[in-house]
Amino acid sequence: MDDKVYNVLFLSTTNSARSLMAEALLTTAGGGRFRGFSAGSSPSGVVHPFTLEQVATTGYSIERLRSKSWDRISTFVSLPLQRLEYNAIHQEVTALGRPPAQGA
């Protein structure tokens, strides 16, 4: 059996709700096989209260949740973007007309 842990980055615009919930859900439900991360193109700087409420039910530490820029994601998670196996990009990010560079 493969013991590899897969890193997944969820990108959105404000990184205040859905991408944070996806980060928490994948990390907690992934059975140790996945680590979720999230970031935004224009982070709001705050985590939506509903997100905090929902994430608290997963067992994921809400203290870890931050609305952060994709420009600084490797600083926050101490993980070079080259080591991310999957990038999940929310539709509103690509609607900005400037999706992240290939391979990021």
Image: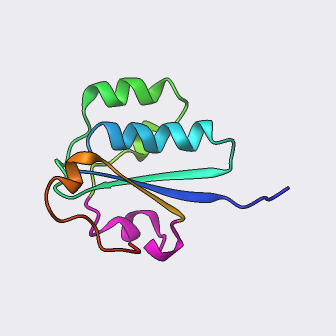
- At 68% from the left edge and 50% from the top edge, which residue is drawn? 33
Query: Which x, y percent locates residue 23?
Result: 45, 45
Magenta span contains residue 75: yes
* Colour pattern: rainbow
- In terms of image quadrants, where is residue 69? bottom left
**19, above or below 93, in the image:** above
Query: Which x, y percent locates residue 63?
Result: 41, 42
- At 45% from the left edge and 63% from the top edge, which residue is drawn? 77
Q: Nearer the viewer, residue 59 or 81?
A: 81
- In terms of image quadrants, where is residue 5? bottom right
Q: Nearer the viewer, residue 98 or 76?
A: 98
Q: How many marks do you count on the picture? A: 0
**83, above or below 89, in the image:** below
Q: Which quarter of the figure is the C terminus placed in?
A: bottom left
Residue reaching furthest to the right: 1
- In terms of image quadrants, where is residue 20? top left
Query: Which x, y percent locates residue 100?
Result: 28, 67
Q: Nearer the viewer, residue 12 or 48?
A: 12
Magenta span contains residue 76: yes
- At 29% from the left edge and 63% from the top edge, which residue is drawn? 70
- At 37% from the left edge and 44% from the top edge, which residue is drawn? 65
Describe residue 101's horizontal placement relative to residue 5 as left or right.
left
Q: Which quarter of the figure is the N terminus placed in?
A: bottom right
Q: Which residues are magenta?
A: 69-84
Describe residue 44's horizontal placement relative to residue 61 as left or right.
left
